[in-house]
């Protein structure tokens, strides 16, 4: 982990924006996969009530 005290304000803000963007891209990917599980009827196939129960 870098020492953020050495970064300029612009660099620090850019780093935050980059990390949040990466988080959102990953979250979107996970949501697409969850939607695909639902589309396939994975809950019934695996013996669960619904997709949230599968994910627990």
Image (cartoon, rainbow, N blue to C red):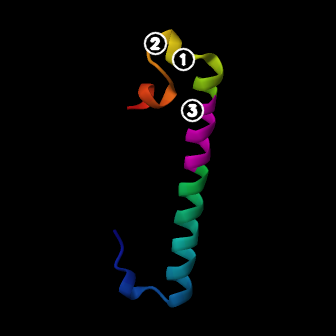
Q: Is residue 28 magenta?
A: yes
Q: CA distance from mark 3 to mark 2?
A: 14 Å
Mark 3 or mark 2: name the one nearer the start of the chain. 3
Question: Could you say which quadrant of the image residue 47 lies in?
Answer: top left
Asked if marks 1 and 2 touch (Cβ < 8 Å), the reply is yes
Q: Residue at 47%, 31% (x, y): give it.
A: 52
Question: Where does the N terminus fall, quadrant-wise?
Answer: bottom left
The residue closer to the viewer here, 34 or 7, is 34
Q: Position of residue 11 (x, y in %)?
A: 53, 82
The label shown at residue 34 is: 3
In-image side of 40 versus 15 (left or right): right
Residue tagged by mark 2?
46
Q: CA distance from mark 3 to mark 1?
A: 10 Å
Q: Secondary structure at mark 3?
A: helix
Mark 3 or mark 1: name the one nearer the start of the chain. 3
Q: Which residues are magenta?
A: 26-35
Q: Secondary structure at mark 1?
A: helix
Residue tagged by mark 1?
42
Q: Residues within 10 Å of mark 3 (few under 14, many from 20)?
A: some
Q: Residue at 39%, 87% (x, y): give it.
A: 6
Secondary structure mostly taken by the magenta-highlighted segment of the chain? helix
Q: CA distance from mark 1 to mark 2?
A: 6 Å
Q: Residue at 37%, 87% (x, y): give it.
A: 5
């Amino acid at each position: 982990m870098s020492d953020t005290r050495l970064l300029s304000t612009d660099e620090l803000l850019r780093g935050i924006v980059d990390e949040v963007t990466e988080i959102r891209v990953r979250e979107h990917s996970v949501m697409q996969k969850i939607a695909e599980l639902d589309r396939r009827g994975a809950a019934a196939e695996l013996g669960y009530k619904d997709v949230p129960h599968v994910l627990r």
